[in-house]
Amino acid sequence: MVTFVRSEEDVAAIRRLHRLVSNARRESSSDDLRVRLSLAGGEADLPQPLTEVLVKAVELMGAGQGVEIVSPAQEVSAQEAAALLNVSRPYVMNLIRKGILPHRMVGAHHRIPLCDLMVYKHEQEPRRAAALANLIGETEELGRG
């Protein structure tokens, strides 16, 4: 289930929360933010991993994006993996054949652990950014020549 901000009240509340998080990060000497949850039954400090998830959700929702929390055990099909990586299904199948992406077979279908797919995507981001910067540089040179 993907959660989007729908009402203007929610948008305003998330923007206020986003400003608080941004200010706390600027004022802190580290990224170690502390969040205290206050409920009718009492108060508790959130563990750091949960705080990081909450902060990331606030940042994404504050930018108008949806947020979905998935289990690390969740698996996706090769087609879903391709959509998440913004590549073709044959490209994903090639990554599987080369052993770059782990998988298991369910009948004739490949199932890829979502956590492994996201690790791969994260590892590829610097390479893709460098390739894009290189392409932009070459395009600008061609435009000048």
Image: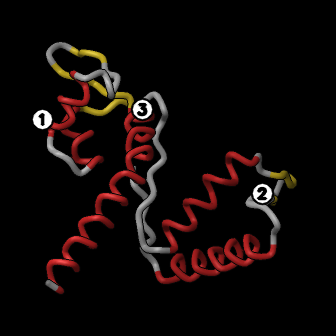
For marks 3 and 2, the one nearer the N-term is 2
Q: Residue at x 41, y 67 (%)?
A: 65
Which residue was labeled with disc 1? Answer: 90
**Horizontal placement of 97 versus 67: left or right?**
left
Sort mark 3 into few (<14), some (14-19) or many (20+) by Cα contacts within 10 Å. Answer: some
**Horizontal placement of 68 versus 83: left or right?**
right
> In this picture, is 21 found above or below 99?
below
Q: Label 1 is placed on what type of residue?
A: Pro
> Residue 90's x, y, as percent?
12, 35
Secondary structure category for the residue under label 2: loop
Which residue was labeled with disc 2? Answer: 32
Q: Label 2 is placed on what type of residue?
A: Asp
Q: Residue at x 14, y 84 (%)?
A: 145
Sort mark 1 into few (<14), some (14-19) or many (20+) by Cα contacts within 10 Å. Answer: few
> In this picture, is 34 found above or below 83?
below
> Residue 111's x, y, as percent?
28, 25
